Amino acid sequence: MYENYYGLTSKPFQLTPDPSFFFGSKWHKRAMSYLQYGLSQAEGFIVITGDIGTGKTTIANSLLDQMQDDIVAAQIVTPKLSPDELVKMVASKFHINVQGSTKSDILNDLEAFLMSLHKQGKRALLLVDEAQNLPLETIEELRMLSNFQAAGKPLLQSFLLGQEELQPILRAPNMEQFRQRIVASCHLAPLTDSECQAYIEYRMQHAGWKGEKKLFSEGAYDRIFQFTHGVPRKINTLMDRILLYGFLEELETLDEDAVENVIKEVSEEMFHPEQKSQAAAEPASILDAPVEQGQIKDVEYYKTMLTELVDALDNAISQKIKLTRYIDRLLKKKYKTYIRLKSDD
């Protein structure tokens, strides 16, 4: 709708991950480098984690888009699969018929398929998205699949992409064997304020923006970053609405006021309950009620409180992760001492 008005050839802020719009922030470039390094090693696991909307799937799609002909890739988005269900899904993604086959049959067929690739000078790559949903025993099944080997090299390599919850799962004491096969890992952080602006400009230009005059003011960029906290998916959602607003209002420049108007609209859609027709002129919600001293605060107050609560929860999670690491190191140390004492006996 707004593409023609702003001289664009495509939609710049669509939610569906598009590898052609890949933007290399500091952490996204690092994650892509790790994936490419893992490919060059042709063994081990690469683990990429990040919060919702930080671009993990976009990175995976970009990697697949650049894939060489000697790599046969499959990508799965995992619900909570059992080990048997995982084996079936992996085989199906490589176009192996699993109908009516036992797990043993499927594994034999999968190994035969991987060996045939090896004889052709090719190898298989599995990208597992939303890997935090996998139970421990299913992740262990992934490790077992990496045991298919030829000439000392694994026939199947796996990359795991998941939210931050994947990290403590992989740090569990009984995941030691899996951890030893991780060749690199990286956590995607949201964009910084300068990266947020560069991200918006990059996607606009990639979509055909050739305007000589700057479309967004500095204040507009600042407000966009404050609202989205640098999360790419949130930026895409907000930017799509801002451009639509600019088209409807026939704006050639989008300033802080324009962005603020869109943010208010989006906030109301997200947080305000649907108004019901009532005979009496009652407030639609508690947020719409008249403010009396010492009773009800404004929306910004509650948004600030929620932000502080999220920060506190993030800090608590960080402390728990550090504690988990410490306990893991302590257990390893005690285990080594136990083994030494047993050998002395």
Image (tube, rainbow, N blue to C red):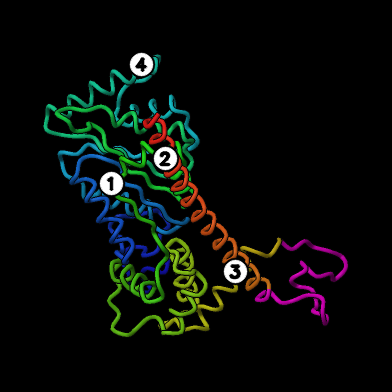
**Circle 3 or circle 2, nearest the eye:** 2
Q: CA distance from mark 4 to mark 1?
A: 29 Å
Dot placed on the residue nearer the N-terminal end, 3 or 4: 4
Q: What is the number of the mark on residue 307?
A: 3
Q: Amino acid at mark 1?
A: Val
Q: Is residue 96 left or right of residue 137?
A: left
- From what the image shows, is residue 320 above or below residue 4? above
Question: Do residues under tags 1 and 2 come within 8 Å of each other at their CB atoms?
Answer: no
Q: Which residue is mark 1?
A: 183
Residue 123 left/right relative to 108: left
Q: Which residues are magenta?
A: 274-301
Task: Evaluate whether residue 131 shows in this view.
Answer: no
Q: Nearer the viewer, mark 2 or mark 4?
A: 2
- Residue toward you, 81 or 171: 171
Name the residue that disc number 4 marks: 104
For marks 2 and 4, give the CA distance. Answer: 40 Å
Residue type at mark 3: give it.
Thr
Q: Amino acid at mark 4?
A: Ser
The answer to whether marks 2 and 4 mark residues whose Cβ atoms lie closer than 8 Å is no
Give the residue at mark 2.
337
Mark in front: 3 vs 1: 1
What is the spatial separation of the Cα atoms under label 1 and label 2, in whole angstroms?
A: 27 Å
| Disc 1 crowd, CA 10 A, few/some/many (<14, 14-19, 20+) | some
User: CA–CA distance between discs 3 and 2?
Assistant: 45 Å
Taking the spot 39% from the left edge, 59% from the top edge, the residue there is: 188
Q: Nearer the viewer, mark 4 or mark 1?
A: 1
Q: Residue furthest right?
A: 280
Residue 278 falls inside the magenta stretch: yes
Which residue is most to the front? 345
Tell me if 56 is positioned left or right of 65 in this view: right
